[in-house]
Amino acid sequence: MRQLGRQAGSALTQTRTVPAPDDLRLELIGVPAGADVPLEVRFEAVSEGVLVTGTAIAPLAGECARCLAPLTSSVTVGFQELYLYAESRHDKHEKHDKHDDQEDQDAGELYHLDGDLLDLEPAFRDAVVLALPMSPLCREDCPGLCAECGEPLADAGPGHRHDEATDPRWAALKQLGDTEDNHQDRRARAIDLQEG
Ligand SMILES: [Zn+2]
Ligand SMILES: [Zn+2]
């Protein structure tokens, strides 16, 4: 950071790997706490402070929303944060005649983010949460689970079906309620299970 001058437009890019913060997940998928997150950060001096632009690759682990199989992937996120120079914060409402004196002070004390990337965590966290899929899939065309037995249809194969008449007691009940409406109910339920 110290190489970055205060002249607007001067910029510096750093790459590093940081451990993922805790509790960065939605219901089905998230970033494992402590996992390596490669991070590229660009610091750019602007008139009021330092504009920090980050790009991170967050590893993801979770389960498929259709078949519940474990899955891993990653998501690339970008985020941006403006850090004000110390005097921009404290003297915001004072007159500009003080400004020239402060301009001459050692730039080192003005960077309260010097060497400290923890300040970036909220911006990183927000970006990742927005990028996490609500319904992660193990693969785009995951067929989900069999609505009857719960077996993953990808494993069961295309010929997977159930003999409706295996148990005569259930078969009898089925015949009693075998109206057109019930057929539609069952079909709707099966679709819900596959998609939900
Ligand atoms: Zn799946
Ligand atoms: Zn089945």
Image: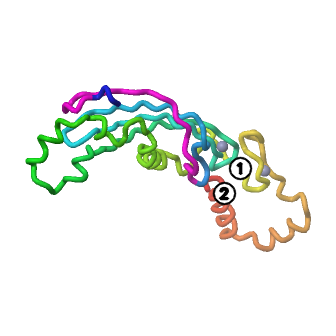
Identify the residue under disc 2: 193
- Picture coordinates of residue 78 (x, y %)? 40, 38
Q: Is residue 41 left or right of residue 104?
A: right
Q: Nearer the viewer, residue 148 or 47?
A: 47
Whether residue 92 appears in magenta in the rendering, the answer is no
Percent x, y of residue 80: 34, 41
Amino acid type, residue under disc 1 in the picture: Leu
**Cα–Cα gap, marks 2 and 1:** 8 Å
Residue at position x 28%, y 33% from top?
Answer: 44
Q: Quadrant of the C terminus?
A: bottom right
Question: Neighbour class for label 1 at 10 Å: few (<14), some, many (≥20)?
Answer: many
Query: Which one is earlier in the sequence, the residue at label 2 or at label 1?
Result: 1
Label 2, secondary structure: give it: helix
Which segment is the magenta one? Answer: 5-26
Left or right, 135 with reference to 167: left
In the picture of the structure, the residue carrying the numbered disc 1 is: 145
**Going 79% across and 54% down the picture, which residue do you hit?**
149
Residues under numbered marks 2 and 1 in contact, where contact means CB atoms less than 8 Å apart: yes
Colour convention of the picture: rainbow
Say above or below: 22 vs 8.
below
The stretch drawn in magenta includes residue 12: yes
